Image (spheres, helix red, strand yellow):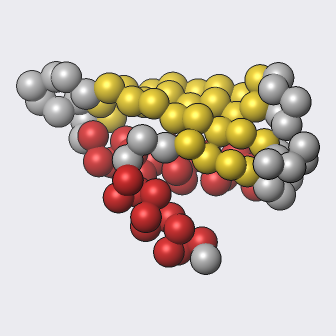
């Protein structure tokens, strides 16, 4: 991994009978310091998962980040992003 790559981590939770979901993400500078963090909730778990990616990519653009490593816990989303971004 390059010293110029930013790191992003996401995590979520959904244990509500109405499918409410909370999700959070952080972006770290290449040397490990926190750059930005965000958390929110959604009525739909799937929408929350895709919303975090949209939000993350918009922040990446606004901070002029050219290289970002994203750690996600949903294999389908990772697969779809790899296809879209390649």
Q: Quadrant of residue 32?
A: top right
Outermost residue to the left: 17
Left or right for 77, reference 15: right
Residue 25 horizontal/vertical position (percent): 56, 32
Is residue 24 visible in the rendered image? The answer is yes
Residue 39 horizontal/vertical position (percent): 51, 26
- Residue occupying the point 39% across, 30% down: 12
Left or right for 28, reference 51: right
- Residue occupying the point 17% across, 33% down: 19
State which quarter of the image contains the C terminus. bottom right
- In the displayed structure, 49 sits above or below 40; it is below
Outermost residue to the front: 1
Residue 74 horizontal/vertical position (percent): 37, 47
Residue 9 horizontal/vertical position (percent): 58, 35
- Residue occupying the point 65% across, 39% down: 8
Total marks shown come to 0
Instruction: Say which of 47 and 8 sits in front.
Output: 8
Is residue 35 visible in the rendered image? The answer is no
């Amino acid at each position: 991994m390059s010293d110029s790559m930013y790191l992003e981590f996401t995590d979520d939770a959904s244990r509500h009978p109405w499918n409410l979901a909370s999700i959070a993400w952080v972006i770290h500078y290449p040397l490990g310091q926190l750059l930005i963090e965000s958390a929110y909730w959604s009525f739909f778990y799937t929408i929350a998962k895709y919303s975090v990616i949209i939000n993350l990519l918009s922040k990446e653009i606004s901070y002029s980040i050219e290289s970002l490593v994203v750690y996600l816990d949903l294999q389908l989303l990772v697969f779809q992003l790899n296809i879209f971004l390649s």
